[in-house]
Image: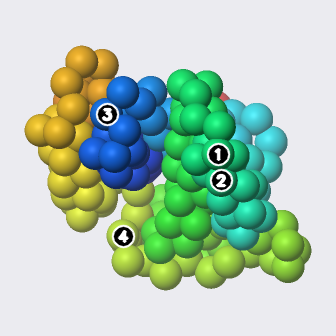
Amino acid sequence: MVLTHIAVGMALSLPVALLAPEFGTVAAIGGAIGGIVPDIDLFVGEHRRTLHFPVLSWPIAIAGCAITLAVPSSLAVVVSAALVAAAVHSTSDMFGAGTELRPWERTNPNAVYDHLRERWLPARYVVRYDGAPEDLALTVVFAAMIAVSLDGSPRWIAVAAVVTAIPYVVFRKRLPEYFEKIL
Ligand SMILES: [Zn+2]
């Protein structure tokens, strides 16, 4: 779920906080942004295809990190952290379920679109569906890493991710009914 991607994206920024503490907060914010952005294609375009690039995002993310190491600045750190988090988000969607309203039914094996090979990557179901209990466990672990390591806005974003994730996980299987009523 997007809340897990936010927590993971922020946790990826922790090495920055260790090596260059002055950039720790901006890196975490960039990680949160990159964790969210791919899932905007839930509302615009085709979900897990329009803004998800599980292969092509990596060279761009690596180039962004190289530029940031060469010419560090807050802007470079926030952009490269967002690029890395978006790349990890797109790739890790493959370890969940397919793009369907009730992913626990496993009727659609398409997890995320690989624009390079022009085909869908199959769902691996390591996390059985978005909003599964194991998904919440991941959110809690990564958010806790942020909450104990950083203060200020990253800590509050991490806490908010967990607080929002709990009701989402509790009501996840009832959501399709609700969406069908309003659509
Ligand atoms: Zn996604």
Label 4 vs label 2: CA separation? 32 Å
- Whether label 3 touches label 1, CB < 8 Å: no
- Whether label 3 touches label 2, CB < 8 Å: no
Q: Nearer the viewer, residue 104 or 75?
A: 75
Residue under label 1: 70
**Mark 3 or mark 4, whichever is nearer to me:** 3
Among the two numbered marks 3 and 1 on one chain, the one whose residue lies closer to the N terminus:
3
Numbered label attached to residue 127: 4
User: How is this picture coloured?
Assistant: rainbow
Label 2, residues with CA under 10 Å away: few <14, some 14-19, many ≥20: few
**Mark 3 or mark 1, whichever is nearer to me:** 1
Label 3 vs label 1: CA separation? 17 Å
**Element type where label 3 sits in the image:** helix
**Element type where label 4 sits in the image:** loop
Numbered label attached to residue 21: 3
Q: Residue at x 30, y 19 (%)?
A: 153
The CB of the residue at mark 2 lies under 8 Å from ligand 1: no
**Mark 4 or mark 2, whichever is nearer to me:** 2
- Whether label 2 touches label 1, CB < 8 Å: yes
Which amino acid type corresponds to the residue marked 3 in the rendered image?
A: Pro
Q: Residue at x 36, y 27 (%)?
A: 22
**Element type where label 1 sits in the image:** helix
